[in-house]
Amino acid sequence: MQNLTAWVEDCVSSRRICAINGMVKTGKSTVLTRLLPQIILTKFPNADICFLDFASFLSAGSEPGAMEERLLKEVCSWATGAGFHVGPADQLTLNQLMDNLDRSGRTVFFLIDQVQRFFQVQEGTIPTWDILKGFLRVSREDSNLHFAITGSGMVLAWQSFVRMTPNGFIFPGVCRRFSSRGRTPSRSWTMPDRNFWPLQPMKPREMNCQTC
């Protein structure tokens, strides 16, 4: 709770992306969709919050271009419904849409579940890593757009995040990580914490923050 609050308070001036990591069924989606919005609206009462469950509108095995097009339409539909003047989706690229949202001056939080789905493209094709990098505004400073991401396949997601073209900014460098701790008793873990961060001892319902 304290670590999530600290990220929300600091995201305007520092890292605008947070990644909620953890094993399956450790409450990541609950944190993303129930706890985090309450914290956001306490700090930013007028903030706009966009919930995106990638698994609900991106089909696994799609072509990379179809993934981008579907994401564009989904965000454009939300933005129009929220009162943003962004224009029709068929006249925009994803970057143009995000630029329009940023220039509005309104504070927007995108809460994204099942983020790994964007990378589950058709066999034999390559995910468009840099398209998602642009969507998450990795290379932008002083942005009004902020992102919290999670999913049941965060290992796959991180394998893709590190493949994003640096261009002066790398995804881990602008992201703060949170670990959603599982229910496994601490005594069953023997790996040293400092060397194996993803496998450190877990306590029920505990959140831990680590800065990349």
Image (cartoon, rainbow, N blue to C red):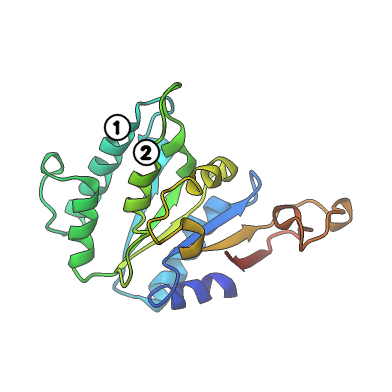
Is 192 left or right of 40, judged from the image as shown?
right
Residue 2 percent location from the top left of the image: 58, 75
> In this view of the protein, which residue sits in the foreground, 160 or 168?
168
Question: What is the residue that sits farthest to the front in this orientation?
Answer: 167
For mark 1, give the secondary structure. Answer: helix
Residue displayed at 39% across by 72% down: 41
**Up-down relation of residue 205 to residue 9 (above or below):** above
For mark 2, give the secondary structure. Answer: loop
Residue displayed at 34% across by 58% down: 137
Evaluate whether residue 23 shows in this view.
yes
Q: Bin the neighbour count of mark 2 within 10 Å (Cα to Cα): few under 14, some 14-19, many 20 and up.
A: some
| Quadrant holding the N terminus | bottom right
| Quadrant holding the C terminus | bottom right
As drawn, the label of residue 65 is 1
Residue 136 percent location from the top left of the image: 36, 55
Is 151 left or right of 104, judged from the image as shown?
right
Quadrant of the image occupied by residue 42: bottom left
> In this view of the protein, which residue sits in the foreground, 99 or 23?
99
Tally of numbered discs: 2
**Up-down relation of residue 45 to residue 170 (above or below):** below
Q: Amino acid at mark 2?
A: Thr
Residue 184 percent location from the top left of the image: 79, 51
Residue 156 percent location from the top left of the image: 55, 40
Q: Amino acid at mark 1?
A: Gly
Task: Report the Cα–Cα distance between label 2 and label 1.
Answer: 8 Å
Contact (Cβ within 8 Å) of mark 2 with mark 1: yes
> In this view of the protein, which residue sits in the foreground, 44 or 38?
44
Q: Pointer 2: what residue?
A: 128
Residue displayed at 59% across by 53% down: 21
